[in-house]
Image (cartoon, rainbow, N blue to C red):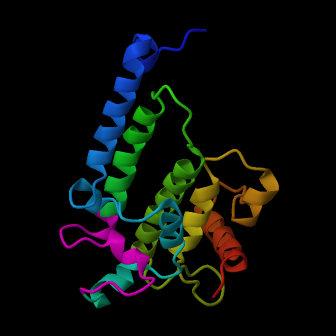
Amino acid sequence: VRPHMPSSQCPPCSKPVYTVLVVLFLASITFPPGLGQFMASRLTMKEHLISLFDNHTWSSLVPNASGVAKPGGLWQEWDHPSATIYGTLSFFLFMKFWMLILATTLPLPAGYFMPIFIYGAAIGRLIGEVVALLFPRGLHSEGLPRPIIPAGYALAGHWAPGPHPAHRAGRTGGQCHQPEEPTVLLRCHHHRQEAALPA
């Protein structure tokens, strides 16, 4: 089967040119003083994951954040004065989606393992922050209210896109098989969060 990608239709001499153009295009978009400031582009892949797995709820930290970034406060890279954390996470997901697709057209080997992990973690973090916004006092299912931990959603999203063994996904909350009961799913997910995340 012949692949139908832009780079496969180029003459051999133009493949390096195509590669350089795509790399320059992607690098210019993610340049931190430009659009990259809305995507936390100053962070490395490892720092992206560390920031997305932060146990704090960012929406509660934003009103108390100072203008100077503190050492280790990687979450502040997602807090831009012109946008909310929901906006930066959404913009990050939108931009990374088509940039990852464009990167797959390059005629050279590329590592998509970590970017897909980060993409899944960002989806989970955004969902977790939205749930924390909707339920600021936590979920009242049984007994005391359980606080929303967006890092747990990021951890579940981190494992979701990749091909992982079921037992590894189960440790992060992937084995809640009751889709007809959303509250049960969230309750089950919170039990997994407490087991998977440090206090």
Residue 123 located within the stretch drawn in magenta: no
Figure disc tally? 0
Q: Which residues are magenta?
A: 67-87
Q: Residue at x 46, y 15 (%)?
A: 8
Q: Quadrant of the C terminus?
A: bottom right
Q: Position of residue 157 (x, y in %)?
A: 57, 58
* Residue at x 70%, y 44% (from the top left corner): 163
**Residue 171 location in percent, x, y?**
75, 65
Q: Which quarter of the image is occupied by the N terminus?
A: top right
- Residue 191 can be seen in this image: yes
Q: Which one is in front, 46 or 81?
A: 46
Residue located 48% across and 65% down the image: 48
Q: Is residue 169 above or below residue 76?
A: above
- Going 57% across and 43% down the picture, which residue do you hit? 111
Q: Residue furthest right?
A: 167
* Quarter of the view holding residue 145: bottom right
Q: Is residue 70 above or below residue 105?
A: below
Res. 180 in view:
no
- Please check the rendered image and state whether residue 84 is part of the magenta-colored stretch, yes or no: yes
Q: Is residue 36 left or right of residue 44?
A: left
Q: Is residue 35 above or below residue 141?
A: above
Q: Is residue 5 rendered to the left or right of residue 197? A: left
Q: Nearer the viewer, residue 120 or 103?
A: 103
